[in-house]
Image (cartoon, rainbow, N blue to C red):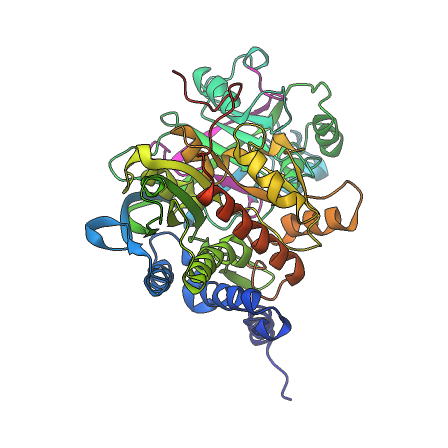
């Protein structure tokens, strides 16, 4: 083999790292699971380009899902008697080309002599500033919005957790904050509000390296924000909201005499944090672009068989969109989104196929929803719940499929809002027959209940839920779960070649089928519990 030049060798390594893994359908014995995974592989294939919201790859995947819904006998439930409900969107992006973050430091000393001559100082006049870049998307990122300025330049100050009372005089400065996500501590939104109201130019929120239940990941795929067309994607005017890695923080506070690692450790343990000024400025330039786009939800209705109950609709949902292309990780820049969430759109199709094959139509109607824009802020589900294509009053439940990682044997399921509606009792009844324990969320600081497409249904008063594969602390199951979030969540490595427990996947699929059957055929519709905070107010 001929020796490759360094660049050619690097490109070869990258291409090999990004090569599409082989189909795994042959590993699966169960026919239902085999069919489910075959569609998962199709929807998360490289030719779908990661199914980014509004992209040609997304539309290609949506066409496949609509075709499968039709073949399963579902009725179009989108716009104009089609399977598609168009969601009009607007995107703001901070382009990598033309965006920069530079730390500018004052000279370490003044005067002549050897040191002064070495760095070009003029005795008594100081010398040139030292500069150090922060790499966009790898060490620092910024939230894209319509009110982001194209440039900021300000003195850096560290203000601990950035409670309003600890800020002091920060007008015209850039405030650096420890980004704690612990319950009872100041929130990110509160930090932004306090700093912007105090006249700061921006806030830099530093990752908590001890928040290991869902660790920070770098690089960020991109810096883009998508919202509904005609609505401003806003933040405080002229204010930059940035996120910084722990390594970037060490760079930022060079010259202060403080130990970055100790500060991060203290913050991670919610100890008191000293505030101090940083002898440096940050100069940042943002290259902004905007565009309008649209992306469809895919909606199919199976009318119920009961003359009375068919007027009640059980929604089953999953999100079809993914991240698309982004910053490369280990030579791969395509974020396939196999488990997040192609696999569970595929399960919706599989459920529809099973019902058709059985000939047993549920008593209630079932609305199959493959939503767009979940990764951009639950946009498709929010649009649907604001513009339902069935009567809003007919919606009696939503069972959402997301956040599911079949990586280890299924013995425990975390259930969102398990004690808030009778859906919890339905799930427990089905799970008990399968030897599965249903648990409430034991990590509420992750706020998972509000991060998936069941939540917009809850906001309009519809009992809704979703599930997470659960585990006991210190077990191999926990190790596998944490590893997935560390290296695969919103990463190109969430592809069909990743570790899988197909038996666990089959068990969950069977649980889902059983739960849908129970809810869609019960005499009574799901209802909120009297003490639920999600129960609609009279």
Q: What percent of the width, then of the height, locates residue 152? A: 43, 32
Q: Nearer the viewer, residue 187 or 402?
A: 402
Q: What percent of the width, then of the height, locates residue 348? A: 45, 55
Q: What percent of the width, then of the height, locates residue 505? A: 61, 57
Q: Main secondary structure of the magenta part?
A: loop
Q: Is residue 436 left or right of residue 421?
A: right
Q: Is residue 45 left or right of residue 180?
A: left
User: In the picture, which quadrant includes the C terminus?
Assistant: top left
Residue 379 falls within the magenta-colored stretch: no
Quadrant in the rendering for residue 457: top left
Quadrant in the rendering for residue 324: bottom left
Residue furthest to the left in view is 80
The answer, for residue 129, to whether it is visible in the render is no
Residue furthest to the right in view is 474
For the record, the magenta segment spans: 134-163
Q: How many numbered discs, if any?
A: 0
The answer, for residue 393, to whether it is visible in the render is yes
User: In the picture, which quadrant includes the N terminus?
Assistant: bottom right
User: What residue is at 41 percent from the left and 58 percent from the top?
Assistant: 51
Q: Nearer the viewer, residue 67 or 310?
A: 310
Q: Is residue 5 above or below residue 72?
A: below
Q: What percent of the width, then of the height, locates residue 30? A: 60, 68
Q: Nearer the viewer, residue 293 or 482?
A: 482
Q: Is residue 31 above or below residue 531?
A: below
Quadrant in the rendering for residue 20: bottom right
Residue 139 falls within the magenta-colored stretch: yes
Q: Is residue 322 above or below residue 123?
A: below
Q: Nearer the viewer, residue 264 or 21?
A: 21
């Amino acid at each position: 083999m001929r020796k490759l030049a360094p660049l050619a060798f690097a490109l070869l390594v990258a291409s090999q790292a990004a090569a599409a893994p082989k189909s795994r359908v042959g590993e699966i014995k169960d026919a239902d699971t085999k069919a489910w995974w075959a569609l998962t592989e199709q929807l998360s294939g490289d030719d779908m380009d990661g199914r980014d919201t509004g992209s040609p790859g997304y539309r290609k995947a949506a066409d496949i899902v609509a075709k499968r819904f039709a073949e399963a006998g579902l009725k179009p439930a989108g716009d104009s008697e089609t399977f598609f409900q168009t969601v009009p969107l607007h995107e703001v992006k901070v382009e990598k080309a033309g965006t920069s973050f530079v730390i500018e430091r004052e000279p370490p000393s003044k005067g002549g002599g050897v040191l002064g001559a070495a760095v070009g100082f003029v005795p008594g006049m100081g010398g040139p500033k030292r500069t150090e870049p922060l790499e966009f998307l790898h060490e620092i990122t910024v939230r894209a919005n319509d009110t982001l300025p194209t440039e900021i330049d300000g003195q850096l100050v560290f203000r601990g957790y950035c409670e309003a009372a600890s800020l002091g005089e920060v007008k015209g400065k850039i405030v650096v904050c420890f980004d704690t996500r612990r319950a009872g501590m100041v929130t990110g939104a509160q930090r932004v509000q306090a700093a912007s109201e105090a006249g700061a130019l921006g806030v830099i929120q530093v990752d908590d390296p001890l928040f290991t239940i869902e660790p920070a990941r770098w690089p960020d795929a991109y810096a883009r924000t998508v919202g509904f067309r005609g609505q401003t994607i806003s933040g405080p005017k002229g204010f930059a909201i940035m996120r910084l890695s722990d390594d970037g923080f060490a760079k930022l506070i060079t010259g202060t005499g403080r130990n970055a690692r100790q500060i991060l450790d203290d913050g991670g343990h919610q100890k008191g944090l000293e505030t101090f000024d940083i002898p440096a400025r940050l100069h940042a330039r943002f290259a902004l672009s905007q565009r309008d786009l649209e992306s469809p939800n895919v909606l199919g209705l199976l009318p119920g068989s009961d003359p009375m109950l068919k007027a009640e609709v059980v929604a089953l949902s999953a999100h079809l969109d993914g991240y698309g292309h982004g910053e490369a990780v280990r030579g791969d820049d395509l974020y396939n989104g196999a488990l997040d969430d192609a696999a569970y759109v595929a399960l919706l199709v599989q459920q529809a196929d099973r019902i058709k094959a059985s000939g047993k139509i549920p008593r209630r109607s079932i609305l199959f929803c493959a939503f767009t824009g979940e990764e951009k802020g639950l946009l498709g589900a929010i649009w649907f719940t604001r513009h339902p294509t069935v009567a809003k009053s007919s919606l009696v439940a939503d069972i959402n499929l997301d956040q599911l990682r079949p990586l280890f044997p299924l013995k425990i399921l975390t259930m969102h809002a398990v004690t808030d509606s009778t859906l919890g009792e339905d799930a427990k009844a089905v799970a008990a027959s399968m030897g599965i324990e249903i648990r409430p969320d034991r990590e509420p600081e992750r706020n998972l209940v509000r991060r998936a497409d069941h939540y917009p249904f809850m906001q309009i008063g519809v009992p809704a839920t979703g599930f997470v594969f659960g585990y006991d602390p210190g077990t191999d199951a926990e190790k596998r779960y944490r590893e997935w979030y560390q290296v695969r969540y919103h990463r190109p490595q969430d592809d069909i070649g990743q570790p899988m427990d197909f038996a666990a996947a089959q068990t969950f699929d069977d649980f889902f089928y059983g739960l849908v059957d129970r809810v869609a055929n019960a005499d009574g519709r799901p209802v909120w519990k009297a003490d639920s905070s999600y129960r609609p107010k009279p």
